[in-house]
Image (cartoon, rainbow, N blue to C red):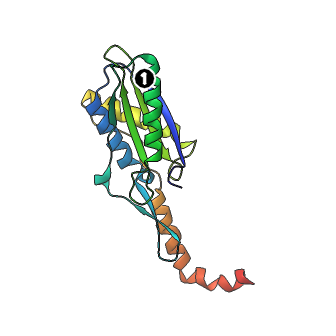
Amino acid sequence: QHHWNQAFIFELPAGIDLAALDVALRGLTSHHDALRLRYTKDGSGTWQQSYGTLDEQLGAGHIDLTQLDAKDRAAAIEAHATEAQAAFNLATGPLMRAVHFDLGSNSRGRLLLVIHHLVVDGVSWRILREDLESLYLAAAGGSAAHLPDKTTTLQAWAQALRNHARAAATEQSFGHWRT
């Protein structure tokens, strides 16, 4: 249950600004609330979903592979990717991991993004990648990022659903639906 994730590895330009990348990753987890979700079981074994705090935002782990030849680099990337994918804990998070692989100053680096499938789907990847790129370019250029406004968040939708379920009119309809 902890290991169920999706992962992509992206090629990055040589000389990427690692500080700007970390700023972009923190901005991504700030903008996309679902990336901060946590899951715990209560005493009855029922799963409970909650949000981690913004201070739990992550940056990228940085792995220096500059001293390795191409074959050993591929094996090292695979080993680190496996480790990143196995490191999730639903209760403590984070449920997104980022690993930057430095392949040398004249080589294009790699960025591995691993996100637990409870908080990402195939459609979301495009949005996350575009937002990460926008956040990175803004941070590297020293300007403020301008992402699209948030739509209704999962948190707001869940609260509205809870309020609706507890409304008197909804409770009064239970008999009808049970029949």
Quarter of the image with the C terminus in it? bottom right
Does residue 130 show up? no
Residue found at x 39% / y 39%: 98
Q: Position of residue 176 (x, y in %)?
A: 71, 83
Q: Amino acid at mark 1?
A: Arg
Does residue 141 show up? yes
Residue found at x 32% / y 57%: 53
Which is nearer the eye, 54 or 106?
A: 106
Quarter of the image with the N terminus in it? bottom right
Which is nearer the eye, 169 or 54?
A: 54
The answer to which image quadrant residue 171 occupies is bottom right
Q: Position of residue 159 (x, y in %)?
A: 47, 68
Give the tally of numbered discs.
1
Side of 69 relative to 22 (left or right): right
Q: Position of residue 152 (x, y in %)?
A: 47, 56
Q: Position of residue 110 (x, y in %)?
A: 41, 26
Which is nearer the eye, 86 or 152?
A: 86
Taking 76 as reference, is 176 above or below it?
Answer: below
Label 1: few (<14), some (14–19) or many (≥20) C-alpha neighbours in 10 Å:
some
The answer to which image quadrant residue 23 occupies is top left
Q: Secondary structure at mark 1?
A: helix
Name of the residue lying farthest toward the top: 106
Which is nearer the eye, 18 or 134?
A: 18
Side of 17 relative to 124 (left or right): left
Name of the residue lying farthest toward the left: 142
Side of 33 relative to 174 (left or right): left
Q: Which residue is mark 1?
A: 73
